[in-house]
């Protein structure tokens, strides 16, 4: 379930950073900013070697966190299996706002992944089935041929979600909101979570 939150004009000391994030996300969306739903996702190997890439944010699931979808056999999928911690960053230059989160990551249930899968365009579903994401591709023609053969084979049929593809949720335990201000006198708000909830503290820019 995607949770919509009320907009916030100011940040109180104990605000949930997810609510703050959603207020700025909705602002970016209302302004029709390019790729307003893009986020940089950073993962790491068991040994701590990092990697990062841009993925699409797919909503907030209550009690779960920030969701995104991918091939479980991709590089990020393998890294999340070995080291289920990640960080993500949203940046909207037009409104001078950057928000980042860190936390634990876990797979979504098959039910949640199936719900989202059914919203994807059919060709995107087909691509998700045939793509061996992150693996070496010797010949692009072979990949396109596999795609077209599957498309022909499944005419009039539902494209089932493959078991190697699905969703993740990042449950944050740390967040930071950066707001651009003149003369580089920016504002930064750090959020940490403990058993009592979120604690907010302003930082030097």
Image (cartoon, helix red, strand yellow):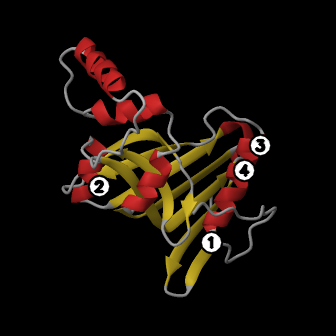
Q: How far apart are labels 3 and 1 at the CA level?
A: 29 Å
Q: Which residue is mark 2?
A: 80
Label 1 packing within 10 angstroms: few (<14), some (14-19), many (20+): few
Q: Earlier in the sequence, mark 2 or mark 1?
A: 2
In which quadrant will I find the C terminus? bottom right
Q: Is residue 171 left or right of residue 202?
A: left
Which mark, residue 201? 1
> Would you say residue 87 is visible in this rendering?
no
Labels 2 and 1 touching (C-beta < 8 A): no
Q: How much space separates mark 3 and mark 4, taking CA atoms?
A: 6 Å
Q: Which residue is mark 4?
A: 26
Name the element at disc 4: helix
Q: Residue furthest top?
A: 141
Measuring from the top left, give residue 37's x and y in whole percent. Answer: 59, 43
Query: N-terminal of the two: label 2 or label 4?
Result: 4
The residue lying toward the viewer, choosing from 145 and 156, is 156
* Residue in view at x 42 percent, y 47 percent: 69
């Amino acid at each position: 379930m995607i949770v919509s939150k009320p907009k916030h004009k100011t940040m109180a000391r104990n605000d949930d950073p997810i609510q703050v994030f959603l207020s700025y996300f909705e602002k970016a969306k209302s302004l029709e900013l390019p790729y307003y739903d893009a986020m940089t996702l950073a993962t790491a190997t068991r040994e701590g070697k990092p990697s990062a890439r841009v993925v699409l944010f797919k909503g907030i699931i209550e009690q779960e966190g920030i969701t995104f979808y991918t091939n479980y056999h991709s590089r990020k999928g393998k890294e999340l299996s070995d080291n289920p911690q990640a960080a993500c960053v949203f940046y909207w230059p037009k409104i001078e706002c950057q928000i980042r989160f860190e936390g634990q990551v876990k797979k979504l249930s098959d039910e949640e992944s199936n719900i989202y899968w059914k919203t994807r365009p059919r060709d995107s579903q087909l691509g998700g089935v045939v793509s061996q994401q992150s693996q070496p591709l010797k010949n692009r023609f072979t990949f396109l041929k596999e795609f077209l053969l599957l498309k022909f084979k499944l005419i009039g049929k539902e494209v089932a979600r493959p078991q190697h593809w699905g969703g993740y949720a990042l449950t944050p335990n740390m967040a930071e909101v950066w707001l651009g201000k003149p003369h580089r006198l920016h504002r930064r708000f750090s959020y940490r979570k403990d058993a009592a909830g979120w604690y907010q503290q302003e930082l030097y820019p």
